[in-house]
Amino acid sequence: MTYKEEFISFMVRSGVLTFGDFTTKSGRKTPYFVNTGNYKTGAQAAKLGDYYAACVQENLPNGIDCLFGPAYKGIPLAVSAAASLFRDYGRDLPYCFNRKEAKDHGEGGSMVGYKPQDGDRVAIIEDVVTAGTAVRESIELFKHVAKVEMKALFVSVDRMERGTRDCSTLDELRQDYGIQVFPIVTVRDVIAFLHNNPVDGRVYIDDGIKVKMENYLAEYGAE
């Protein structure tokens, strides 16, 4: 089993990837939902870091100087990914994250952890990007921190949905900022792996759910 397939099973077992009738923040009715807030144990954090590290190592085995986790959900993701990169691949990358409000005492500033330097190549570690707001805010934030190169964005799942244009939100970020974007898995990967393939004896995507997901992508999917 590939790390991508293992990750899909991991999301299901963690109650992060669920199927049913949901409404997204944008008002779209969706037959599946990804809630990364359901990760809550040390074992899950360790495994999650392993999957992000595998994705980083597969796509950018070098050329990164720093991992950045946008507050708040990105913070534990960047930390766990950095730990896994060191443990599994011997890559000791520094990490940092932002405060929601800049600190005006002590060392001050909006960044915690590593202090990015001019010329650094930064990779953003995020969960699921919907509108891309947090990523755009992060890129704007770094303009006031140092002259860095925003090298890449790593996310857990690409829902492959249209953003404000005909392309997906991740493609919008690629176009607008020239940033490379790498999901651990896409919704197409999820459908292909889980369709009539049980996890712990239960089928999560049967023929009926698959039709609903395909219909959803037909209506909201990016071209």
Image (tube, rainbow, N blue to C red):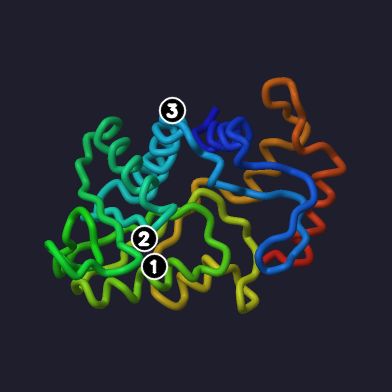
Distance from disc 2 to disc 1, alpha carbons, whole Å, reads 5 Å
Evaluate if marks 2 and 1 touch, with contact meaning CB atoms under 8 Å apart: yes
Q: Which x, y percent locates residue 2?
A: 52, 32
Q: Is residue 118 above or below residue 189?
A: below
Q: Residues within 10 Å of mark 1 (few under 14, many from 20)?
A: many
The residue tagged 3 is: 43
Q: Residues within 10 Å of mark 2 (few under 14, many from 20)?
A: many
Element marked by disc 3: helix
The residue tagged 2 is: 152
Q: Is residue 70 above or below residue 38?
A: below
Where is residue 106, by image quadrant? bottom left
Distance from disc 1 to disc 3, alpha carbons, whole Å, reads 31 Å
The amino acid type found where label 1 is placed reads Ile
Q: How many marks?
A: 3
The residue tagged 1 is: 179
Element marked by disc 1: loop
